[in-house]
Amino acid sequence: MDVAPIFEPLRFRNLTVKNRIVRSNISGRFDNYDGSGTRTRINWELKFARGGVGAIVSSFVPVQLRGRIVPNYAMIDSDRHIPFWRELGRAVHEHDCRFILQLSHGGRQRDVSGIEFPVGLSSTDRPDPTHGFACERMTVAQIQETVSAFAEGARRAREAGLDGVELHGANGYLITQFLSSAINDRRDEYGGPLQNRARFVLEIVRAIRARAGDDFHLQMKISVQEYNDAVALFGAGPSGNTVEESVQVCRWLAEAGVDAFHVSTGSFFPHPRNPAGRDLPVEELAATYDTMISSGEDAFQNYLLLRRLPALARRQWNAAAPAADAIEGANLPDARRVKTAVAVPVICTGGFQTARVIASAIQRGDCDAVSIARPLIANNDLVEIFRRGQDRADRPCTYCNRCLANVIEHPLGCYEESRFPSRDAMISEVMSVFDPAPFA
Ligand SMILES: Cc1cc2nc3c(=O)[nH]c(=O)nc-3n(C[C@H](O)[C@H](O)[C@H](O)COP(=O)(O)O)c2cc1C
Ligand code: SF4
């Protein structure tokens, strides 16, 4: 097997990365309630930098307090956070790994709203279909304020010495809420035809270029297909943006100065196709979802479903998930469509953990790099495993999504007990993120 394509440098317009494996965004509640970062987050990111990935794209980093999806995520809404991000960037750079910060705003899609803003903002005033979080339809003044917040976030990331920023334009968060034909019901210049729905993100890109410069790496994560109607329990609804529409959005964004695209899927999060898995971990969800009951109108009903009708919940979810053997590379056809339409590099996310699959996707020209989340949680040193000539880790990720089900209440990590010699070994691995401790 020729794994050479994985280890070729990846050249963006303003950034070079040593190989073609990017650690994909993974959020965990590692930080302080006020959005200041912690040593634990640095420990987390270092696991992957040491493991050999070329670049890390951060977790969801809110650009505004009202855009937070859950408390205890490090934020970039104030200059006071710059020193933390500088420290994190420096630590990651010591391992010849680049760090790209994901500029994010949750809009109406949240997990735990927090004390400051129980009601979110969105393109619409309809609550999100998953948990039923209430929201207000943004005024044009609020839109402009949010555009500036994204630009300020990019400026701060640059001042912190980070290597670039990614717009979280995927998976149902605020930028998707504007782009999506299934969500955006506005009648002004930010709603209706595709060009209007894309106005918000295009304004963000122009504002970032004006505030953070033309030579600062800027990429966009986008759900190329939305599958908005995937889960019948959330309402049949329209299916959302088509591949053709998303490809057109990517063309406009590239013209406006976006340097790369990160291809994802799904108009809400989590979605049966992202992170894809065939076996919804209902027991774990029933144990952690209670945290959300008081936050969204539909959360209590979801909780009862998980507890009382787990088989129904599992069936509904699994019916829309790709087959187990189709999870790895499920988004490659979409990545290829974007790649043929734009001249900038394309990164593809979704299930990657086999060297042969990754190398041939790059060789075929489906994408220029892959991003990996869960398989790297499971095997932090996956890149080194590939370098040694092994096609897969001995204990691969099972796509069980227990990491996701636990993260609302517990530290982020792999919770698939079958991958460990014992439960104690699993817990010990999860808790290793607290080492070194902040005051050690
Ligand atoms: C626990 C968890 C947290 C995630 N957090 C984010 C996030 O903050 N931002 C984002 O864009 N994607 C997030 N994702 C999605 C991943 O970045 C990735 O695109 C997706 O899981 C598919 O890749 P995988 O099959 O390699 O996990 C998260 C996924 C998981 C499992
Ligand atoms: S809990 Fe572990 S095995 Fe399961 S999806 Fe997450 S990382 Fe993979």
Image (cartoon, rainbow, N blue to C red):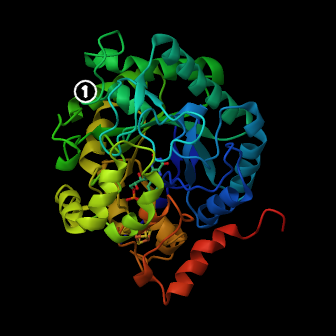
Residue drawn 53% across the image and 20% down it: 147
Q: Nearer the viewer, residue 270 or 351?
A: 270
Residue that sits furthest to the bottom in the current view: 421
Mark 1, secondary structure of its residue: loop
56 with respect to 337 (left or right): right
Residue drawn 30% across the image and 52% down it: 301
Q: Position of residue 359 (x, y in %)?
A: 37, 61
Q: Position of residue 68 (x, y in %)?
A: 55, 39
Ligand 2 occupies quarter: bottom left
> Quarter of the image containing the C terminus?
bottom right
Where is residue 239, by image quadrant? top left
Q: Nearer the viewer, residue 424 or 256?
A: 424
> Quarter of the image containing the N terminus?
bottom left
* Circle count: 1
Disc 1 within 8 angstroms of ligand 1 (CB): no
Q: Is residue 334 above or below residue 392?
A: above
Q: Can residue 394 be seen from the camera position used here?
A: no
Q: Position of residue 381 (x, y in %)?
A: 54, 71
Identify which amino acid the numbered label 1 is placed on.
Answer: Ser
The residue to which callout 1 is attached is 181
Q: Is residue 388 above or below residue 166?
A: below
Q: Can residue 182 be seen from the camera position used here?
A: yes
**Mark 1 packing: few (<14 Cα in 10 Å), some, or many (20+)?**
many
Q: Position of residue 354 (x, y in %)?
A: 36, 68
323 with respect to 17 (left or right): left
Q: Nearer the viewer, residue 196 or 208?
A: 196
Q: Is residue 424 above or below residue 109?
A: below
Q: Is residue 278 above or below residue 274?
A: below
Residue drawn 63% across the image and 30% down it: 153
